Each structure stands twice: as C-alpha cells, then as structure tokens.
Image (spheres, rainbow, N blue to C red):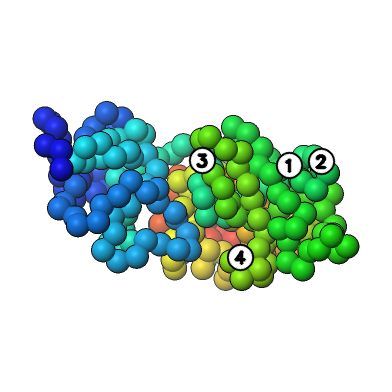
Amino acid sequence: MAAPEAGALPAEELVGQVVLPGDVLLLPSHPEADGERLQLGPGAAPPGRLVCGPGLRRCGAGLLVTKCGLLRHRQSGGAYWVDSQQKRYVPVKGDHVIGIVTMKAGDIFKVDVGGSEQASLSYLAFEGATKRNRPNVQVGDLIYGQFIVANKDMEPEMVCIDSSGRANGMGVIGHEGLLFKVSLGLIRKLLAPNCEIIQELGQLYPFEIVFGMNGRIWVKAKTIQQTLIVAHILEACEHMTAEQRKQAFAKLSES
C-alpha cells in the first residue's frame, strides 16, 4: 500500500464536516478496499467492503476529494461520499431517474435525463415487451427507469425492468401531474429512510410522488391546487429548519 500523503487527514474524523477539492483523506485499514462508486439505492455494498462514492476518487492509500461539500459515511455499506449541492446530474449505474422521451429512432428511444448527453432506452426494456407487443411510448412522455450502463466512455443506457424482468413501479408516468426540478442534495434527503418531510406531507393531502436521483420530482394530488402546494413545499424544504417546516404545515392544516 502506498505511503500516506503529507497533509492527509483521517476520513473518520471528517465525517459531517466540509471538505474541499484537493483534500486527501486517509482511510482506515481495510482488507478489501476498492475504487467502486457508491450506488445510493438498492444493491448496497456487501459487509466488509469499502466503497468510494460521488465526489471522491481513490488516491494511493486514501481518497482525493473532487467536489466541495459535506463528507458522509454509511456504516452498513462501508461507503464514503461527498454530499454536495451540485445541480448538473452525472449518471450512475443503478440510479433510478425520471427522463423525458425526446426522440424515437428505430427500436431505441432517446431520453433526456438532465445529464451531458441523452440516454438510450430499448423498446424491449419494458415489462412484457416483445417485437409484436411494443410499449406505447411517445415523444414527450415521462419515463421512470434505472441505468444499467453509465460511465464516461459509453452512452448511458436505461431500462424499465428490474433483474427479474418486472416493472416494479418503473415505466411511463401518467400524463397528468407536475414535473419539477430540485437540487441533488434535496433528493437524497427526501429519499432517506423515514423522511419526516414526506410523512408530514402525507398527513396533509393524499398524493402520488416519484423521485428521480437526477433531481426531478413528479407529483400528483387530487386537485391542481393541492399538487402545486405539495411541489412548493418540497422546493422550500431545502432551506427550512424543522421548526419552520412544522409551522408551515400547521398553517396549511388550518386552511
């Protein structure tokens, strides 16, 4: 193993603190450390495995910070990553995202996912799809799917089925409802287990909601007014304290 670089600090001591590009973090001794990227979703790394996530790069015996933000660590997956307020989405294999169909070229759909290039989606990548039974997908439709290919040297590729061939909630999202964009940091916050924001919103109105790791949210409530209220609250929650949020919910409950 390479010798620690001068000025490097133990990663465990910096968890929850701001790190800057160029900082070098020392890793605890680990028998199976590797340079794999973190997948913030299903399929976490197995126990005893160290994962290098977004905003970090392996550098000798440690990690090189490539983005400004808060250093995070997940014990269960052995993962380190930088929680930044980045707005430009970079596709990551396994991420579930909301895309917009922009073009149909033969057997392939082109999907805008908010990244630097569009993703491809085969018409066979839907549950029950065959050459005779093609999915009803039109230009302008919203697609909820996940990446199976995502790296800097290849075009991103999406599917709308899981490993067993089931849709599992993926596919074309209803034409009604509202699509809006938030920061990637807020998406990770809303997708955290037992997120209080979603629980409190659910007590106000019944609604359907879909989160994309690319910063897009689709929401639909009973009325257009309720849909807009839910969207405005979700957008505002990023800059509200828990107390401010409770006060806002209390006013909406009274009205």
Q: How many C-alpha atoms fall within 10 Å of the one at disc 1: few (<14), some, or many (≥20)?
A: many
**Along the line of sight, the residue nearer the viewer: 58 or 23:** 58
Q: Which mark sits nearer the N-terminus, 1 or 2?
A: 2
Q: Which mark sits nearer the N-terminus, 1 or 3?
A: 1
Tell me: 113 left or right of 222.
left
Q: Quadrant of residue 100?
A: top right
Q: CA distance from mark 1 to mark 3?
A: 17 Å
Cβ atoms at labels 3 and 2 below 8 Å apart: no
Dot 3 amino acid type = Asn
Dot 4 amino acid type = Asp
Q: Which mark sits nearer the N-terminus, 2 or 4?
A: 2
Residue 110 — which label?
1
- Which residue shows up at 77% across the image and 54% down it? 123
Residue denoted by label 2? 105
Residue 151 — which label?
3
Q: For the residue labelled by badge 3, is the local secondary structure a helix, a strand or a loop?
A: strand
Cβ atoms at labels 1 and 2 below 8 Å apart: yes
Q: Does any portion of residue 69 appear in the rendered image?
A: no
User: Residue 76 placed where, x, y %?
Assistant: 31, 65
User: Residue 56 placed where, x, y %?
Assistant: 33, 40
Q: For the residue labelled by badge 2, is the local secondary structure a helix, a strand or a loop?
A: strand
Tell me: 145 left or right of 91.
right
Q: Quadrant of the N terminus?
A: top left
Q: CA distance from mark 3 to mark 2?
A: 22 Å
Residue 162 — which label?
4
Dot 1 amino acid type = Lys
Dot 2 amino acid type = Ala
Q: Nearer the viewer, mark 1 or mark 2?
A: 2
